Every structure is written in C-alpha cells, then in structure tokens.
Image (cartoon, rainbow, N blue to C red):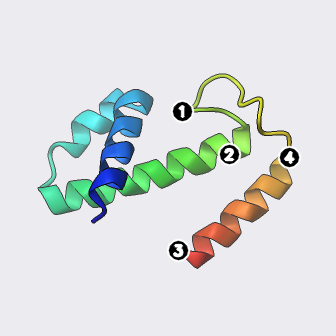
Amino acid sequence: MNAPLIGQAAQSIAIGSESFAAGSRLFDRSTRESVVMLYFWCRYCDDVVDGQVLGHGRNTDERRDPVERLAQLRRLTRQA
C-alpha cells in the first residue's frame, strides 16, 4: 500500500479514536493497514457530511449542503 497514505491514516486513527487505534494493533501488518484505511475513509465521510474535522468542531470551509456532500461521497465510493 501507499506508505505516506497509510501514515496519514494511522495519524487520523490515533487522533480520532484511541480505542480503534489500540484494537488495530491486534492485527497483522497487512490486515492492520486495511483496517486503518477503512477507518480513515469512514472518518473522512463522517467529517464531510457533518462539516467537521476528525469528529470535532466545524470546518468553516465546508459550506455545501449536507445532502450534496453525501452525494459526492457516494460518487467517490463507487469510483474507489
């Protein structure tokens, strides 16, 4: 997998969910990387819909309607 992206995902999980980060360490490296990437995508989707950053505050740059944000995430998920 893409090492810089894995690093970014690992940082996100460490900040966003200490319990999930701790639990992910139970997996072998390959599985852990997949789990961390899945968490990273889910965290990103949640933040986009809620207009937040790592589940906190408000992203002042996000002014689009939540329904529009969800539609964009659906498109990106299908593309992936």
Separation of disc 1 and disc 2 at Cα? 10 Å
- Name the image quarter holding residue 70: bottom right
Asked which secondary structure carries label 3, the reply is: loop
Q: Earlier in the sequence, mark 3 or mark 1?
A: 1
Instruction: Give the image location of residue 26, x and y in percent.
Output: 14, 45
**For the residues bearing labels 3 and 1, Cβ distance under 8 angstroms:** no
Residue at screen point 63% across, 41% down: 47
Asked which secondary structure carries label 4, the reply is: loop
Q: Earlier in the sequence, mark 4 or mark 2?
A: 2
**For the residues bearing labels 4 and 2, Cβ distance under 8 angstroms:** no
User: Would you name the residue on which mark 1 appears?
Assistant: 54
**Tag 3: amino acid:** Ala
**Tag 1: amino acid:** Leu
Depth order, front residue of 5/32: 5
- Name the image quarter holding residue 50: top right
Q: Which mark is residue 80?
A: 3
Please determine whether, in this image, residue 35 is positioned above or below residue 48. below
User: Callout 1 environment at 10 Å: few (<14), some (14 to 19), or many (20+)?
Assistant: some
Please determine whether, in this image, residue 49 is positioned above or below residue 41. above
Instruction: Give the image location of residue 15, x and y in percent.
Output: 40, 28
Depth order, front residue of 31/64: 64
Separation of disc 3 and disc 2 at Cα? 17 Å
User: Would you name the residue on which mark 2 appears?
Assistant: 48
Separation of disc 4 and disc 2 at Cα? 10 Å
User: Would you name the residue on which mark 4 appears?
Assistant: 64
**For the residues bearing labels 3 and 2, Cβ distance under 8 angstroms:** no
User: Callout 2 environment at 10 Å: few (<14), some (14 to 19), or many (20+)?
Assistant: many
- Name the image quarter holding residue 46: top right
Instruction: Give the image location of residue 42, x and y in percent.
Output: 52, 51
Depth order, front residue of 48/26: 48
